[in-house]
Image (spheres, grey):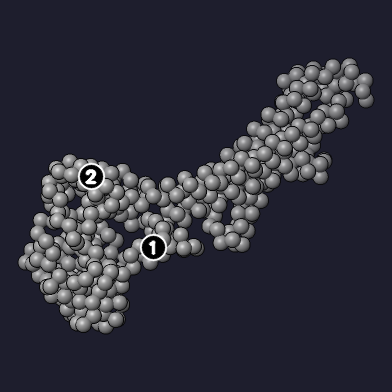
């Protein structure tokens, strides 16, 4: 084998230009495939990051009617849907895919939230437990959070996010200010922000509509105060944090199943569902990948052309080295030895083309990214498969020339010199 490799590299080096031109089809095909795969991989990662953010891995499980979240602002709580018990929450937290879980009430603000003479229209009020903030990947920017004792004693404290501080309070010092929420007064004791400052990449209006969430802000009050300002016995939602991004789908569905098993709604269209951003990302990724898969098949045609070129040049090489083959067979070289030598040369030739193609593909992907702004991510498994596939092409298209060389009659081969 080592002798075959040495002879293959010597033959390629002896005819450098011819070898390069032979490899050109392989180089172009591999480069095109690597560039396309890198663009698909980069686009998929951007879609996933845009939807899921920087890795908080949170999944929202909400009460739905048909395919829409139930808005309890104007509707009565559905019959047979009770509040989520501590036993149900404990079962959710015991799931292998769940790192933490917290229940909360939610109301979109259409009216009823005031600061002095200013009113808030848009955004959300959430009634939360104290562990909601860590589950939601929120950290204190200013002030503090309310405690378990304050929740038990029905203290009317609230925590706001930066959007509320900027829009409703007009960047006044928020701590100690009083907000009127649902007719009750709440003292602001803290301002929270997300632990990451990730923003989705927005290139088009469609991206904005797909990725951007409500930016009007959120006010957090103790969940024990929710019946005072809004409604008693109102069903909660659940926010969970999955152990990893890949666990989000399973964690969300299992959590929804546990809650649904604990309720008995009279309306079959009412049930808890997970707002699965990972699944949404995967659907968009599949659309992106299927759109580009045809491009990969088109690029693969050049590999077929390159393989035919390799077969052609190997046939020429057999013709040029007829006397050499005849001499080797005359001194006892077997057919397998001759065939192995030419197959090795073909495989080495296409493998070198594959390696050069991968390098060119990576460079081409970077150029596409710079010129068009399209994200790219180099897929090294795809690069390894591409080189291996190019070697297979060399072997497949080298079979005919090597078989022809191995079956030459040594007397005729020596006479041809």
Separation of disc 2 and disc 1 at Cα? 28 Å
Estimate the x, y position of residue 316 in percent, counting from the top left. 83, 32
Residue visible at 25% across and 60% down in the picture:
134
Q: In the rendered structure, which disc, 2 or 1, sits on the residue that comes first in sequence?
A: 1
Residue visible at 38% across and 59% down in the picture:
53
Q: Is residue 336 above or below residue 72?
A: above
Q: Is residue 243 visible?
A: no
The one of 179 and 4 positioned closer to us in this rendering: 179
Left or right, 299 with respect to 258, comes to right
Badge number at residue 212:
1
The one of 409 and 123 positioned closer to us in this rendering: 123
Pointer 2 residue: 269
Estimate the x, y position of residue 155 in percent, counting from the top left. 9, 70
Q: Is residue 163 above or below residue 312?
A: below
The one of 184 and 332 positioned closer to us in this rendering: 184
Q: Quadrant of the N terminus?
A: top right
Q: Quadrant of the C terminus?
A: top right
Estimate the x, y position of residue 369 in percent, counting from the top left. 58, 59
Left or right, 177 with respect to 360, comes to left
User: Helix, strand, or loop for circle 2?
Assistant: loop
The one of 109 and 318 positioned closer to us in this rendering: 109
Image quarter for residue 311?
A: top right
Badge number at residue 184:
none
Image quarter for residue 185?
A: bottom left
Residue visible at 23% across and 44% down in the picture:
269
Residue visible at 21% across and 46% down in the picture:
270
User: Helix, strand, or loop for circle 1?
Assistant: loop
Left or right, 151 with respect to 220, comes to left
Q: Nearer the viewer, mark 2 or mark 1?
A: 2
């Amino acid at each position: 084998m080592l002798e075959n490799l040495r002879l293959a590299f010597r033959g390629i080096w002896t005819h450098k230009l011819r070898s390069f031109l032979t490899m050109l089809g392989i180089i172009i095909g591999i480069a095109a495939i690597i560039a396309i795969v890198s663009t698909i991989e980069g686009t998929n990662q951007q879609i996933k990051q845009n939807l899921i953010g920087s890795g908080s891995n949170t999944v929202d499980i909400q009460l739905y009617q048909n395919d829409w979240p139930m808005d309890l602002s104007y509707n009565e709580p559905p019959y047979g849907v009770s509040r989520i018990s501590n036993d149900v929450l404990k079962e959710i937290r015991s799931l292998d895919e769940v790192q933490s879980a917290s229940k909360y009430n939610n109301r979109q603000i259409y009216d009823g939230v005031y600061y002095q003479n200013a009113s808030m229209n848009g955004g959300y009020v959430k009634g939360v437990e104290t562990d909601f903030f860590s589950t939601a990947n929120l950290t204190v920017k200013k002030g503090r959070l309310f405690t378990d004792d304050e929740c038990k004693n029905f203290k009317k404290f609230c925590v706001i996010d930066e959007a509320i501080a900027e829009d409703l309070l007009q960047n006044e010092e928020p701590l100690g200010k009083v907000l009127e929420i649902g007719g009750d007064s709440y003292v602001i004791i803290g301002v929270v922000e997300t632990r990451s400052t990730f923003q989705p990449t927005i290139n088009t209006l469609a991206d904005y509509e797909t990725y951007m969430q409500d930016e009007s802000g959120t006010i957090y009050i103790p969940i024990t105060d929710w019946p005072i300002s809004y409604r008693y016995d109102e069903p909660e939602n659940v926010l969970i944090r999955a152990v990893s991004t890949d666990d989000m789908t399973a964690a969300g569905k299992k959590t929804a199943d546990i809650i649904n098993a604990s309720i008995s709604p009279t309306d079959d269209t009412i049930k808890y569902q997970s707002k699965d951003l990972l699944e949404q990302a995967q659907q968009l990724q599949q659309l992106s990948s299927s759109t580009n898969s045809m491009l990969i098949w088109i690029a693969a045609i050049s590999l077929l052309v390159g393989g035919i070129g390799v077969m052609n040049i190997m046939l020429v090489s057999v013709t040029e080295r007829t006397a050499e083959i005849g001499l080797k067979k005359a001194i006892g070289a077997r057919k397998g030895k001759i065939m192995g030598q030419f197959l090795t040369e073909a495989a080495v030739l296409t493998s070198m083309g594959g390696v050069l193609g991968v390098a060119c593909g990576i460079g081409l992907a970077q150029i596409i990214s710079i010129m068009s702004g399209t994200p790219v991510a180099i897929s090294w498994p795809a690069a390894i498969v591409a080189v291996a596939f190019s070697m297979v092409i060399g072997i497949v298209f080298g079979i005919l020339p090597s078989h022809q060389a191995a079956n030459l009659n040594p007397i005729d081969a020596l006479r041809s010199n």
